[in-house]
Image (cartoon, grey):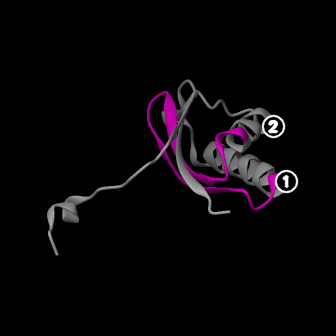
Amino acid sequence: MALRKFIIERDIPKVGTFERDQLRGAAAKSNGVLRQLGPDIQWVESYVADNKTFCVYLAKDEEIIRKHAEISGFPATKVTEVRKMIDPTTERQD
């Protein structure tokens, strides 16, 4: 089964002020849960804003993303499946 791409919006107060060690600890916690859940979910990257993060995950379905959130304690405020991607080269006809 191919993994699908999701964007997870997480409301985390003041996350934008977290120091590197705090972010390292959060990554370690998330990675531990990912290892526990197995190959049906992968963390690609996360973008940290003032009071939330936007995480890109590959997963078999939304359910396993919600399970990761429950076990890790990181909220999955909004989960959106990515249907298509575009970039500046999308306008090309070749």
70 in relation to 55, above or below: above
SS assignment at label 1: helix
Instruction: Tell me: residue 80, above or below residue 39.
Output: above
Q: Residue 77: where, in percent of width, then height? A: 58, 27
Residue 61: within the magenta? Answer: yes
In which quadrant of the rendered view does residue 87 lie?
bottom left
Question: Closest to the observer: 22 or 72?
Answer: 72
The residue beneath circle 2 is: 71
Dot 2: what SS?
A: helix
- Rendering coords of residue 92 (x, y %): 15, 67
Q: Residue at x 72, y 48 (%)?
A: 30
Outermost residue on the top side: it is: 13
Q: Residue at x 56, y 24 (%)?
A: 13
Q: Residues within 10 Å of mark 1 (few under 14, many from 20)?
A: few
Crowding at label 2, few (<14), some or many (≥20) Cα neighbours within 10 Å?
some
Callout 2 amino acid: Ile
Q: CA distance from mark 1 to mark 2?
A: 10 Å
Q: How many numbered markers are drawn?
A: 2
User: Are dots 1 and 2 in contact, CB under 8 Å?
Assistant: yes
Q: Label 1, on which residue?
A: 36
Q: Earlier in the sequence, mark 1 or mark 2?
A: 1
> Does residue 16 appear to the left or right of 75 in the view shown?
left
Looking at the rendering, the stretch of residues picked out in magenta corresponds to: 37-63
Q: Is residue 25 left or right of residue 38?
A: left
x then y, percent, for residue 68: 74, 41
Residue in the picture at 80% in, 58% down:
38
Give the amino acid type for the residue marked by disc 1 in the picture: Gln
Residue 89 painted magenta: no
Residue farthest to the bottom? 94
